[in-house]
């Protein structure tokens, strides 16, 4: 019986660790998704600024 209880305890501990790691992966994936959205927004803004800068500089080309 003692061996069986140890096996059950080890299984429960392993399952708990797996669950914790899955939750960590989920949280990291959510953060990465948010960062990707922020990067896309920043990229769009930089693209628009680059267009405006190119238009402003085009006036001074010889």
Image: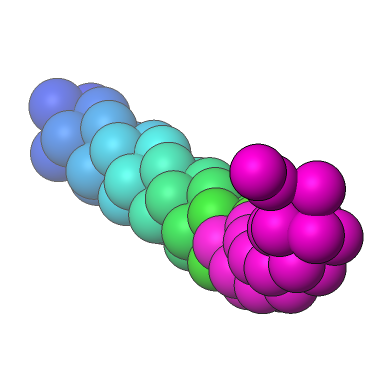
Q: Classify residue 22 by image quadrant.
A: bottom left
Q: Classify residue 49 by image quadrant.
A: bottom right
**Residue toward you, 9 or 37:** 37
Q: Is residue 42 left or right of residue 22?
A: right
Q: Kindly identify the residue that appears in the image at 56 percent across and 62 percent down.
A: 36
Spot occupied by residue 35 in the image (x, y as percentages of width and height):
65, 56
Spot occupied by residue 57 in the image (x, y as percentages of width and height):
78, 51
Spot occupied by residue 26 in the image (x, y as percentages of width and height):
49, 61
Spot occupied by residue 25 in the image (x, y as percentages of width and height):
44, 50
Q: Kindly identify the residue that appears in the image at 42 percent across and 43 percent down.
A: 21
Q: Is residue 53 left or right of residue 9?
A: right
Colour scheme used in the picture?
rainbow
**Residue toward you, 30 or 2:** 30
The stretch in magenta equals 36-62
| Res 1 seen here | no
| Res 48 seen here | yes
Q: Is residue 27 left or right of residue 56?
A: left
Look at the picture and state if 53 lies above or below 20: below
Q: Kindly identify the residue that appears in the image at 65 percent across and 43 percent down.
A: 62
Q: Is residue 41 left or right of residue 59?
A: left
Instruction: Tell me if residue 54 is in the magenta stretch.
Output: yes
Predominant SS along the magenta part: helix
**Residue toward you, 3 or 37:** 37
**Residue toward you, 24 or 31:** 31
Instruction: Tell me if residue 4 is in the magenta stretch.
Output: no
The quadrant of the rendering that contains the N terminus is top left
């Amino acid at each position: 019986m003692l061996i069986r209880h140890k096996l059950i305890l080890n299984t429960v501990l392993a399952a708990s660790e797996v669950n914790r790691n899955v939750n960590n992966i989920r949280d990291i994936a959510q953060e990465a998704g948010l960062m990707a959205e922020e990067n896309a927004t920043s990229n769009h803004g930089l693209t628009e600024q680059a267009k405006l800068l190119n238009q402003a500089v085009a006036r001074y080309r010889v």
